[in-house]
Amino acid sequence: MRGFNASSAGCSAGQHSPVAQASSFPSAVAPSVGPSSAQSPSPSSPHPTPWTPPSEDPTSAQDLQQLASLVDTCAGRWNAEGNTKRLGDVLGRAATLHAAASPARAKAKAYGDLLDRRRETLLNAFQPTLRVLDAPSCLALLTVCVASRMMWRDLAGQLLERLSAECGPEGGGEAALQACPPQALAAVLVACATLGHKQPVLSGLAAEECARRQFAGFDAMALADTAWAMAKLRRKDPAWFGPLVEAAGKADGPMGQGVSAKALFLTWYALARVQHVPASGALLERTAEAAEALRSSASPMQAANLLWALSTLGLNEERIVDALAGRLGDQLAKDPSRMKVADVCQALEALAVMGPEVLSRHSGLVEGLLREAERRWDAGSGSRGARTRALDRGDLEGLWVVQRALTSLGGDLQHVLGAGEGREGSLLEAARVAAKA
């Protein structure tokens, strides 16, 4: 069964908190999560008259133009003071303003060009401060970069390089890692994983520090972030994942009451990717206790891929499976267009791998997902290229697994795709070809 690339997952539950001071950090945010778009107005509205900042607080800026004006006014003094707090606040506010742009506006070339110019202006204004950052300040700013959906990728890369250099015998990087909060350790690992950082010393030291602490003090998202990052970095050490799972599974721990669907999804995704089956059922029980929350708040992507993770690990907890299946069924009935075809195929394959009892119990969902997959295939308007863009090879291979399971099970479901048996251009024939390639 194929895996899922969570680095591109559209998870949507995080919020950004600016750096309060050089040694304080915002809450950790999972790799693909940024600030809430409800926090501010449009990032770039016209101003017929010059804007006078009411204060030096970057949150007073209502768009990127105002923020650039504030920085132009104050950056000289902030640099002279070495004020990393303001730098962190500016980076965070810029990310919040960017997140407020409508999807259509954010994709427009003119907006992208404007954003690039504003981003360059802001970073250039702070170069004197950036050149003299110490390790704790680097960690604080790196945490902001991760919380901002890696809007500041180039800066994050520079900070990783600086921290790596500081991890030598005479640097302060290792001591800073030992003193920093869990969210900063998570940020280091997430940034390394997201950017493909090629110097393993820094990520190794951060991982060792997580293990040394036995993940004490990590909240649910910090645990999920570190697990995701280690899986992305292809670190599979059971001795490292074991304590993380133990911390996550505690009855009064971070994955207890109120845990988000996103945190559960990322954690289980990571465990599936490294093939780490928990030694006890504690984390599975915490997840089952959150079934109601999963039923009401998991996105289609989270639901489909949490099913994939459980099936990959050979875990079939009825309360979790039923909640996730119910969530997918609701979405299918309400607005199937919000489901990516990869989610449709991933959910089908996961249910098939879980076995005939699960397929039978959720036969209505299985039929609906199969027909949605066929609808997406037929939407290719007869063009093979358009069809294969709609469903990639992994989707087709998964559907072949599903069809074989349904054929073994017997009954009407096998005929949904089976109606295309022997018909050139049918979804079933495409799945058969993909599986045999």
Image (tube, rainbow, N blue to C red):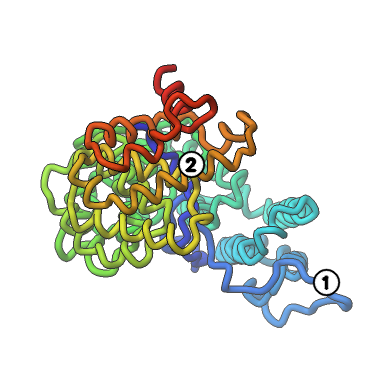
The image shows residue 201 at horizontal and vertical percentages of: 40, 33
The span from disc 2 to disc 1 (Cα, nearest Å) is 47 Å
The image shows residue 427 at horizontal and vertical percentages of: 48, 33
- Residue 55 is at least partly visible in this image: yes
* Secondary structure under the numbered disc 2 in the rendered image: helix
344 horizontally vs 315: left or right? right
Give the residue drawn at x 39%, y 62%: 330
Mark with earlier residue (2, 1): 1
Q: Quadrant location of residue 38?
A: bottom right
Give the residue drawn at x 36%, y 48%: 367
Q: Quadrant location of residue 181?
A: bottom left
Q: Are marks 2 and 1 in contact (CB under 8 Å)?
A: no
- Amino acid type of the residue tagged 2 in the rendering: Glu
Q: Residues within 10 Å of mark 1 (few under 14, many from 20)?
A: few
366 horizontally vs 32: left or right? left
- Viewer-proximal residue among 112 and 3: 3
128 is higher (above) or lower (below) than 3:
below
11 horizontally vs 401: left or right? right
Farthest bottom residue in view: 54
- Viewer-proximal residue among 429 and 168: 429
Q: Nearer the viewer, mark 2 or mark 1?
A: 2
Give the residue drawn at x 58%, y 63%: 92
Q: Specify the quadrant that holds the N terminus.
A: top left
- Amino acid type of the residue tagged 1 in the rendering: Pro
Q: Specify the quadrant that holds the C terminus.
A: top left
31 horizontally vs 263: left or right? right
The image's mark for residue 374 is 2
Residue position for label 1: 46
Farthest top residue in view: 437
